[in-house]
Amino acid sequence: MQKQKNFIKVKEDFICENCGKKIKGTGYTNHCPDCLFSKHVDLELPGDRLSKCKGLMEPIGAEYKSKEWIVTHKCQKCGLIRKNKANSNDNKEKLIELSTNSILNNS
């Protein structure tokens, strides 16, 4: 079987397991726009949904690069660290707070 090499768009609504907010997915939604928590569902490619871990991905940092926010998540179950693009409706105060924490932790 040949491996999928491209992003897999999966349009899914979900309830955030961290804060309980109901989220309407767009096919590119991979985290809660309020608390920024995600879930470890993808193994190799965004949208593959092949991970068996299913742990909560805690936002541990954020950075603003090339006119967009990037959120760093760490799985609370297995420790995987992964970066994801933020969405335009994401909590800007939380992104700024995370970016400040990132700067302080890297000093």
Image (tube, rainbow, N blue to C red):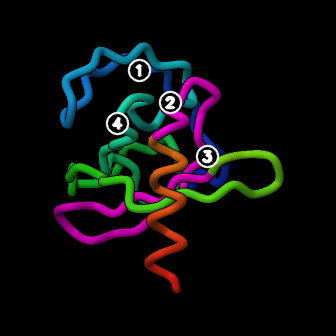
Percent across and percent down for residue 28 are: 57, 30
Residue 49 position in % (x across, y down): 38, 43
Q: Say left or right for 76 vs 63.
A: left
Task: Answer with mark 1 or mark 3, whichever residue precedes in sequence.
Answer: 1
Residue farthest along the bottom direction in this orientation: 107
The magenta-colored residue range is: 70-93
Q: How far apart are marks 1 and 2 (CA)?
A: 8 Å
Q: Does the magenta stretch include residue 92?
A: yes
Q: Which label sits in the foreground, 1 or 2?
A: 2
For the residues marked 4 and 1, what is the alpha-carbon distance in whole angstroms?
18 Å
Q: Mark 1 points at which residue?
A: 12
Against 33, residue 103 (above or below) is: below
Task: Say which element carries label 1.
Answer: loop
Mark 1, Cα crowd under 10 Å, few <14 / some 14-19 / many 20+, is few
32 shown above or below 6: above
Q: In this view, does 76 lie to the left or right of 4?
A: left
Decide: is 65 above or below 106: above
Give the CA distance from mark 2 to mark 3: 10 Å
Q: Which of 64 and 73 is in front in this view?
A: 64
Asked whether disc 4 touches disc 3, contact meaning CB atoms under 8 Å apart, the reply is: no
Q: Which of marks 4 and 2 is nearer the N terminus?
A: 2
Q: Which quarter of the picture shows residue 26? A: top right
Which residue does the numbered mark 4 point to in the structure image? Answer: 35
Disc 4, SS: loop
Badge 3 is on which residue? Answer: 85
